[in-house]
Each structure stands twice: as structure tokens, then as C-alpha cells.
Image (cartoon, helix red, strand yellow):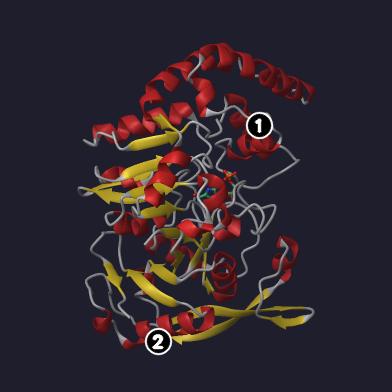
Amino acid sequence: MNTVVLGLQWGDEGKGKAIDYLAGAFDVVTRFQGGHNAGHTVYYQGRKVVLHVLPSGIFYPACLAVIAHGVVVQPLQLVEEIQNARALGLSLQNLALSENAPLILPFHQQLDVVFEDSRYQRIGTTRRGIGPAYEDVIGRRALFVGDLLQESVFRAKIAPLAEYYNRLFAAYGHASENLDQAIERYLQAGQFLKPHVADTTRLLQRAFVEKKNILFEGAQGSLLDINLGTYPFVTSSNTTIAGVFSGTGLSPKAVDRVIGISKAYTTRVGEGPFPTELKDRSGKELRERGNEYGATTGRPRRVGWLDLVALKHAVQINGVDSLFLTKLDVLDELSEIQVATAYASDSGSDDRFPPHADALERVRPVYRALPGWRQPLGAIRRLGELPRPVRSYLEFIEKFTGVGVSHLSLGGEREQTIEVER
Ligand code: IMP
């Protein structure tokens, strides 16, 4: 079954663990959007590994791991990530990188930082140059992985772009970087990456025709989608189902199932509205229990109750078939758990997600209190062994969102996962 795995919140839903758990059953695992702003935490041979651009398929030598053209690539970072993975004993012969993946160039990163530190824009980005790189794609100025493999092409294409950005930096009083050194390093990275570079759309289409099992690995979360998220506090790619098709070149016919990942509560990094955020001690406690610190930037995550209004919205826009609920064990010690079932505002109460971040900023969540279970879940391996309040919590979520829970994660290890058979 070709399966899409997507985050349904503001990222950090535990996709790394979920995808790693599922990946073993697939012939192909492909990333289709985002870049090294992502941080997918997995445990490999007892060691914690954080993947940023490499698909989780790299841990399975028989699996083809694809970085498709929807992903923006910073070549120096990718080289480093590959080297780190090789140090773990992985050969990475199974890695394919799209020749059409747009490049994150040095000025993109600089622009991201300049904007973040300016009065023009403060999104709380990962400062990796993701937004500016996608801007160049939309602006029809981008350079691609394929360009990096031919020195003369790369030099000819980057020169006018560098001039454009340098003028911009100069106009606002920012020193521009000396590119000569960076160009050399990028070209060297290109030669390092060359054995992996391929027409990944063709590889994926062939896999589809040959009825191979394909796993589409989403990054970030649906509420960070550039078109459907809490704009402008979003990332710059389509993190929702649409990104699968534009980012790989496969059609909707290639998707059999959509699994949505959600935490049993909610977190968010960066700026932007977050109706169920807990700003008091209980939020701090939940952050510590859940170790809610960014895998990419180390920033403390904002923490709050599960927002079912937002979750249902994400289920609907993605056509989610089932939920993979993570970090349920983080709630173990609570005697009562709240979930938001509607939003109150000056114009009344509504159970629908508002289309604009401004409107979301103004709502107050309406909560429903559910009993906690007050016992550790980490060692439980079967659904029937879960305490009654846990099952009630799950049933409430299922009824509200209209989709069933197919997987439960009760800890960081692969084995701490329960598959719900129906
Ligand atoms: P950017 O993707 O670096 O441009 O950041 C835009 C917004 O998306 C910021 O609020 C980031 O914190 C958020 N973001 C980007 N990548 C991730 C992620 O992998 N997990 C959670 N939040 C993310």
C-alpha cells in the first residue's frame, strides 16, 4: 500500500519515529518537500539519530531512499549528513537525490537571518534559508542540483543571482558574503553528491508501475503549509497532501493511504497563533516530560492541550485515513486531560478552524475535560491492556475527527508502538 505520512499539527508530531516504524515494510521511502529545517529523530542500534534531509529509508539497505525535487537542498549540509550516516555504518548506496531539487545558496541563508532579525518579518524560522530558496523557485531564478554538477553552468547561473542579492543587502546596509570560497565548496559538494543524483520522478514512476511499496515521508506539519496553514507563520512549502504530487511527479493514483501523525497534545515552535497553548507551570511540566526541545534548533517548544478543532481540519484537508497518535505516555501522570472541541470568539462559538491566522489569534478554546489514567503506559504492547481512560481518550478523538487511530506510540523506541487492528 503506497502510504503518505503527514504531520497534522505544527510539526514535531513524532514523524521520525512513526516513519521509521513503518519504513521497514516499504521498497521506497521518499521525501517530497521542506529541507533541513526538518529534524526527524529516530533510534538506530540504540543511538539517537536526527535526520534532516535524508529519508528514513536509509536505515534499510534494501529500500530506495529518495530526496525528490520538492525538497530544497543545501549541498554542504547534505554532504555532512551523509558523512554522519556513513559513520554509523550505513553505506547509503540506496540514496537517490533529484537533479531537479532546488539549491539553498549562501545568500538564502543570509536573507533568512536578515529578515528574522529585522523589523520586516519575524516568523521564528529555523534560519536555514528555506523560505528564500523557495522564493527563488517561485521567482523563476532558482538553481538546481543538476546545475551544481557542471562547473561552468553553476558559475554562470549563480553570478547574476549573487549580484541581485548583494544589491539588496547593500541597499539595506548589510555586508554581503564573499561568494568565491562558497562556490568552490558547493562545487566540491556537487562532485561528492554526483553518484546519488538521478531523475527521481522517473525512478518513482518506475517503482509505481512495478507495484513497489512507496512511503511518502512528510516534513513539518499541515498547519505550517504555505497555502493552508496559519499564514504568515508557516513554512514555505506544501506540507499537506498536495506537496506529494508537486514534489515527486507522481499522481494521486499512486497514493493508497494517508496516515496522519498527531501528538496526544500540541506543540509549536516559532511565532504564530496557538489557541490551546499552556503558558503556566503545567505547560512547563509537559515540556519537560515530553522533552519538547527542537531537534533542529534546540529551541524550547511551546506546549498546549490537544486541539481537536485544528486536528479535524488537518484530517479533512489531507483526506487522512487513520491517525498515528504519538507521545501518549507524556500524559501519564495527569489526573485530568483537556481537549479543545470548539473556539469561542466575540461572534459566538464555532467548531471550525478559521481561515486566517488573525482570526485564530482572537479565539478562546472551549475545553472538554477527560479523565487521566495516572499510570505508566511505556511497557504496554497491546490495545486491550490499555487502561480504560486511555481508550476513552482515543475514542473521543476518533469520534470527533471521524477517523480511527491505527497506531499508538507510547515511547521513543520502535517497540513502544501498538498497531490497532480493526
Ligand atoms: P522555516 O521552515 O525555517 O522557514 O520556518 C518557518 C516556521 O516553520 C517556523 O515557525 C519554524 O519553527 C517552523 N518549522 C520549520 N520546520 C519545522 C519542523 O521541522 N518542525 C517544527 N516546526 C518547523
Q: Neighbour class for label 1 at 10 Å: few (<14), some, many (≥20)? A: many
Q: Is mark 1 on a helix, strand or loop?
A: helix
Q: Earlier in the sequence, mark 1 or mark 2?
A: 1
Residue drawn where x is 35% and y is 54% of the image: 211
- Residue 117 appears anywhere in the view: no
Q: Residue 278's image quarter? A: bottom right
Residue designated by label 1 = 111
The amino acid type of the residue labelled 2 equals Ser
Relative image position of residue 340 (x, y in whole percent): 57, 78
Q: In this view, does 110 lie to the left or right of 219?
A: right
Front residue (pair 414, 26) = 26
Q: Quadrant of the C terminus?
A: bottom left
User: Measured along the vertical axis of the image, is residue 316 above or below residue 67?
Assistant: below
The amino acid type of the residue labelled 1 equals Leu
Residue drawn where x is 42% and y is 45% of the image: 204
Q: How far apart are marks 1 and 2 (CA)?
A: 48 Å
Q: In which quarter of the image is the N terminus?
A: bottom left
Q: Residue 290's image quarter? A: bottom left
- Residue 258 appears anywhere in the view: yes
Q: In this view, does 101 lie to the left or right of 357?
A: left
Residue designated by label 2 = 392
Q: Neighbour class for label 2 at 10 Å: few (<14), some, many (≥20)? A: some
Q: Is mark 2 on a helix, strand or loop?
A: helix
Relative image position of residue 366 (x, y in whole percent): 62, 81
Front residue (pair 73, 182) = 73
Q: In this view, does 136 lie to the left or right of 327?
A: right
Say whether marks 1 and 2 touch (CB < 8 Å): no
Residue drawn where x is 71% and y is 83% of the image: 349
Relative image position of residue 188 (x, y in whole percent): 43, 17
User: Measured along the vertical axis of the image, is residue 290 above or below residue 422?
Assistant: above
User: Measured along the vertical axis of the image, is residue 79 above or below residue 150?
Assistant: below
